[in-house]
Image (spheres, coloured by chain):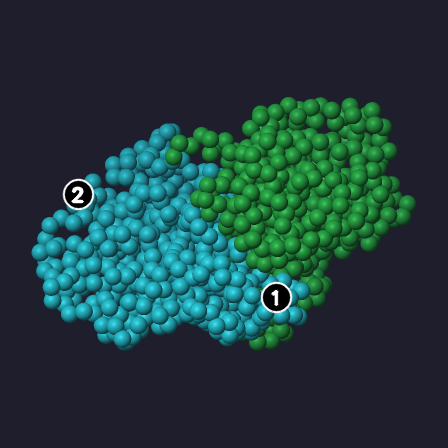
Amino acid sequence: MEVAAAPLSLESQAGSVAEAPARDDGCAVAPAARPVLRERGQREVFCGLTGIIWLHRKIQDAFFIIVGSRTCAHLMQSAAGVMAFAEPRFATAIIEDRDLAGLADANDELDKVVDRLLARRPDVKAVFLVGSCPSEVIKLDLSRAAQRLSARHMPNVRVLAYSGSGIETTFTQGEDACLTALVRDMPVAPADAPPSLLVLGALPDVVEDQFKRTFDALGIGPVAFLPARRARDLPAVGPNTRLLLAQPFLADTVRALEDRGATRIDALFPFGAEGTSAWFEAAAAEFGIAPAHVETVLAPGRDRARRALEPARRQLEGKSIFFFPDSQLEPPLARFLSRELGMRPIEVGTPYLHGTHLARDLALLPAETRLSEGQDVERQLDRCRAAAPDLVVCGLGLANPLEAEGLTTKWAIELVFSPIHGFEQAADLAGLFARPLARRGLLKV
Amino acid sequence: MQLAMWTYEGPPHVGALRVATGMRGLHYVLHAPQGDTYADLLFTMIERRNARPPVTYTTFQARDLGGDTAGLFKQAAHDAYARFKPEAIIVGASCTAELLQDDPGGLARALDLPVPVIPLDLPSYQKKESWGASETFLALVRALADRSLTPPPREGRRLTCNLLGPTALGFRHRDDVAEITRLLSELGVDVAITAPMGASPRDLVRLGAADFNVVLYPETGEAAARWLEKTFSQPAVRIPPIGHGATCDFVRAVAAITGADADAFLAGPRARLPWYSRSVDSTYLTGKRVFVYGDATHAIAMARVAVEELGFELVGLGAYNREFAREVRVAAERYGLTALITDDHMDVEAAIAELQPELVLGTQMERHIAKRLRIPCAVISAPVHVQDFPARYSPVMGFEGANVLFDTLVHPLVMGLEEHLLAMFRDDFEFHDGAGPSHLAALTPSTAAHAAAPAHTPDAAPVADDAAPHAPPANDAIVWTAPAEKELAKIPFFVRGKARRNTERYAAERGLASIDVETLYDAKAHFAR
């Protein structure tokens, strides 16, 4: 389809245009002064509570108690289909009228809920009290509740708190808030500790294991992952801790770790052959590994990824794509699709654009790609229809209606719930974008 | 503060959304924070609707709280009208916005929009989804129905009725409406307005012009029907036509209003269910112990179908919507039971584990419970799942609905002679009860564990809490001898749990310390029905 990106008529939009935040790390990539369309209005995105869906599978000894309303409980079961689990390790403490009458009551109620849960689930070693919109609005202090409950249940059970409320967090920002809470409990690494690497962001176990093997082969170590599979396995953090982001949505986690002396390694995000290569190379450079050795270790995986991407490239090359905001993964994914598969990103929407962490990825996006942050879904739908992209990446609420209008869509949520990082998953990631188009070609109905 | 792993009903504003989404030409402006838009996917994914629900969410954020959330609401309502040009607007608050006390009704009225604006007052911390739908529909009817209307003179025309209650995301509402519309037509009655689903605000204006009302779903339609009865003196038919007997009763109730000859109408064969149930192949259904749970309307109706039309024995009856607890209790008493009124699925699971029925008729949650307890199950009630919107025509109301129910209730069971063969050759290495009914796909916990919505968890690795079935604890005090344990294993799995419990109860009542083969058969004789 030969539809170029719709011309930016930014003045007519409600949103404001601003320069992307200035880069602050003085790296070699030329900083592109790229306009960002910032909008606010109706957002068709999940709140941060939904992060619990993958966090409770990742952190296997943790239980998540949402302190919220019936809406929160309904959201979780609708978004996650929790009936798949006999008894999931998350639940909602539903605030009722009588809890709203007085906060002291709410705290007593919460203590009772936690006590009952721990009596029934002795396997649980960490409890997260997760704030919601209503708990934030009535100013229920969950941090204090967590301290009180921790004092009561330590050393058996650690109780932590964070907010996944929709008034503060969008979808993946819930994980950011959860990890930030964990950072507070991380032990202090001494100033003379040897350099260590901390990889940030929940990864499927298979990917984590692959990455661990590659770091071993490169000679980088010790390596820890946050979150770990056990909530109690928290690595120490100090001035010799180096941070490598596997996910782009961890602004607060990084800030909390930097406050404790850790430093972030600037890198592309590990999507595709190019991104994964650059990600490992950046870490290797930080740890002073010889480039020749790095090349020896990475070349087989990178070549395998490139070969595996070929079929998808034949399907996707030249196709235009439009991202609605969802997970903050949009900019690095658009970079991958554009650079390695020849797709043409028309608009890359993201709930929140972290200019510094994403600087390298943003620099590699085509100049004509429109970046948008936040959302006014009606206006964005107007732009999407006008652009008539070959593929739309959007949430579950928009996908079928857009399909019915004749557009081809990819559910954004699958990008969060599938192993997509690293060399070995590069083709799987490409396949997620190729499949809707292939299906449309197959069907004769 | 109740800890809920799962809920049978959403918040009341989701009920309002089901009304708005079912209707045409209505728009809902909902004061709500980011994230509440998840409700859209209920309609676009589970029900596979091809359009977005007609709702605008104000999407306020933390930084707005100290500022002007009311202004945000007014802007959203203004923009929604300008963009969608609805015939009428409903306005309300979700749970968080309710705490802000911005008064969406007053704010919307101040905008002076050129269409009716109907405020909804749905207390999120007290009420639930069905109540929200019912209340929303009632508010719309009260606000829009033209009170000056009366039905035209009856002479020389067919009678008309309104079908009340169907909504978006309703359990089989789409096909029930088609089936009952056809049935009424055969009875000489034209459906004037089906509402909320399919109606526009303009349609609701004319509700008073129909001769009578039919309440298909009391959970969502009864409140409006009562108001219409009071306002227009419209009689209402209140028998949900679910099952053959109930459908016949429904026909008689309609005929009583229209003056048609119900007996003549019902004389011919209308459904296959009666013959299928009387045919000898169905003998094996006799006395199957069945547990029924769902919304009150479907649970009560299904209990009657199970007992009167399939010859099952009802061992439990319950519902999750307390608004209709009285009706469920009355129905349960008819079968000599105490109704289970709870919205905690753990209570339901405990009841099923205790009763060890041979068949469970329930919601998607009972399907999961039954799977864990290895009991056959059929889904007969909301909350809905993508599977409850089958591509084929599949009503549960009317005569075709009765046929559908025969299939639905019989299909999960081990069939006729197969059941006997399982009992005769219990140690057959291929044809053992662990293999399950031969006409059903082999189910293992991993392949059967489908999610309610199309989301996946990142790692499919089995973890401890996936497995743990909540098996009833065995009575510790009584020991089973090895031969008795072996004999018990020869009893087909679908009655084994019951046999174990009965035998233990029998032994306990007699103060026996151990159970041998003799005890097992003594107990069998004692509890023989």
Which of the 4 image quarters holds residue A177? bottom right
Residue A111, given in percent of the width and then of the height, sits at 62, 66
Read off the chain for label 1: A
Q: Residue at x 61, y 52 (%)?
A: A171
What x and y, as percent, mark residue B518? Answer: 33, 45
Check disc 2: other Cα within 10 Å, few if <14, some if 14-19, many if 20+: few
Helix, strand or loop for disc 1: helix
Q: Which mark is residue B279?
A: 2
Whether residue B421 appears in this view of the structure is yes
Q: What residue is drawn where x is 10% and y is 58%? A: B263
Q: Is residue B112 left or right of residue B196?
A: right
Q: Quadrant of residue B132?
A: bottom left
In front of the other: A243 or B479: A243
The reply to whether discs 1 and 2 touch (Cβ–Cβ < 8 Å) is no
Name which residue type carries label 1.
Ser
Chain B painted colour:
cyan
The colour applied to the residues of chain A in this rendering is green
Q: Element under label 2?
A: loop
Chain letter belonging to callout 2: B
A219 relative to B167, above or below: above
Of residues B128 and B376, which is closer to you in this image? B128
Which amino acid does the dot numbered 2 rest on?
Answer: Ser
Q: Residue at x 56, y 28 (%)?
A: A315
Query: Where is residue B251 drawn, in percent x and y?
Result: 17, 59
Is disc 1 in the same subunit as disc 2? no
Q: Is residue A189 left or right of residue B419?
A: right
Residue indicated by mark 1: A135
* Apparent side of residue A218 relative to residue B258 in the rendered image (left or right): right
